[in-house]
Amino acid sequence: MAGNQQATQVIDHLFRNEFGKAVAYLIGKFGPSHLSAAEDAVQDALMKAMQSWPFGTIPDNPTAWIIRVANNKLIDQLRRQQKVYYATQLPETPEAPPIISDDLFKDEMVKMMFACCNPAMSTEHQLILTLKILGGLSIREIASSLLKKEETIAKAYTRAKKKFKEENPTLEIPTSGEIQNRLVVVLKVLYLLFNEGYKCTEGDQLIRKELCEEAMRLNHILLDKPETNNEWTRAHMALMHYHVARFAARTDESGEAISLELQDRSKWDAQHIELGNRYLNTIPEGYHNEYFIQAAISGIHVNARSYEQTNWAGILTLYNHLYSLKPNPLIALYRIIPVAMTHGPEVALSELSKLENEPLLKHNHLLSATRAELYCQLADWPKAKTALHEAIQKAENDKEKAFLNRKLVSIPGN
Amino acid sequence: MKQFLYLFRGGDEEYARQSPEQMQAHMAKWGEWMLKISQNDQPVPGLPLQAEGKVVYNGGETITDGPFMEGKELVGGYVLVEANDLDHAVELSKDCPIFEFGGSLEVREAVEM
């Protein structure tokens, strides 16, 4: 019961989530130019919560408490800096803010998402702003999850904040003419964020999963508002659910990647699959929607009982649709294995040969790895080994090399 | 059972550098510890203290703002705990999360009436 709740019983990630909410609320009220001061005020409020809540019980409404304290700290700070224009009336005494409805918070959060993901800024800046403000991560945590140096991220963030203020004179929901374009940019950042967490690279696995969850939580906020709940947001949600369903099965105990073919499907999370299905089913016809197609492809995989029993023809059709939407060589490459599974490895090899000279794919280990897979299907072991050696050469990091090496070792006659 | 006062000092500088997630984790540790050293199901009584205060001398003849001390000297809060004796009270203090960020803790027995 809230009234008796103790400091040990605060819900997971409350502080982190409240950080974004509170900053969004304060910026909405005082303006984007006070971003740094707002962040400091919220940080101070959380510190005060940390120091005082253990001595009693946590407030009935932790959000309201944090907002009230942060709001008053910010007012104090602004007053001290005399950054008050005559038009702004600062209250004389600490004020209790009005009861803030959930709806208002959602509004402020969505405005903040559009502001952080303003296409006038670089993708790097958009990502860092999203992680820092909306995600409530510290510079150190961001650096750790992006596998970069703390100093690099700190500098990038300083520049990003400057851009944020320049490009967002006010916080607002884009007009109906602009909103779809802006939404696509937000979804791109969320997908980038999700992929950072999903990648099988080194680093703290716990933080990686939290990045995925963070992307999904933010996507959820978009779903809660009618202006931003459309087939794009829902398809994107489905896609993330399908990926996250496989989170536990994609690495073994030593953290090595396991291919889709070999994953233990009993470890796939049925709840996430079900949620993905539900979101996808809300979209009757989605072939113009790249997230829909990607989600549908994932959906076929996760709903299949086994690699062999997968509806490969369905997947191939979807890839063909995707290719006509985005005729890029990488998609042509992804479609090769589905071709093999429906028309046989020789046909697939012949399709693959058309991609061999693609400049975008020349240094991509996946091209060689796919060729190796096809030769394995044909039991042409010498050619498979050659292709794998090539792939290992081109592989970008140790995890990928290790994965390919294990494949090499498993080939007969080695 | 005797009464002991714990006075907490320091840690503030480091606190300010923690991420929201880390602060929440630290807070949970305080909550746990205050239950652990308690003799019942409630956390031990105590309160945090505001940094700004006043020092009064001579019936109010002199009143200064303060005490202004270096961060690690300033008492940030207190807790009253029951223990068998001073050694026991010291023992109970060892798990206090104040040490995580370089703070310290003073243990004083309250005189029995």
Image (tube, coloured by chain):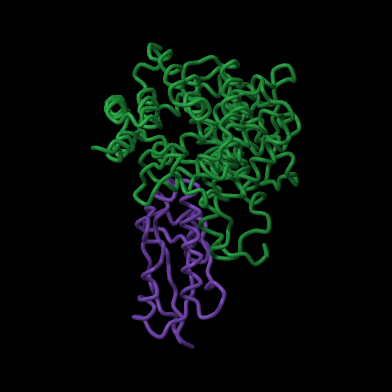
Chain colours: A green, B purple
Residue A274 is situated, as x and y percent measured from the top left of the image, at 65, 45
Vertical comparison of B75 with A41: above or below = below
Residue A393 is situated, as x and y percent measured from the top left of the image, at 27, 26
Q: For this rendering, which residue is in front, A268 or A190?
A: A268
Residue B53 is situated, as x and y percent measured from the top left of the image, at 51, 56
Residue A289 horizontal side relative to residue A130, left or right: right
At horizontal 49% and vertical 67% (from top left) the residue drawn is: B32
Vertical comparison of A209 with B1: above or below = above
Residue A402 horizontal side relative to residue A312, left or right: left
Q: For this rendering, which residue is in front, A250 or A138?
A: A250
Q: Quadrant of residue A72?
A: top right
Count of marks, rendered view: 0
At horizontal 44% and vertical 83% (from top left) the residue drawn is: B111
Residue A76 visible somewhere in the drawing? no
Residue A37 visible somewhere in the drawing? yes
Q: Quadrant of residue A90?
A: top right
Vertical comparison of A57 with A63: above or below = below
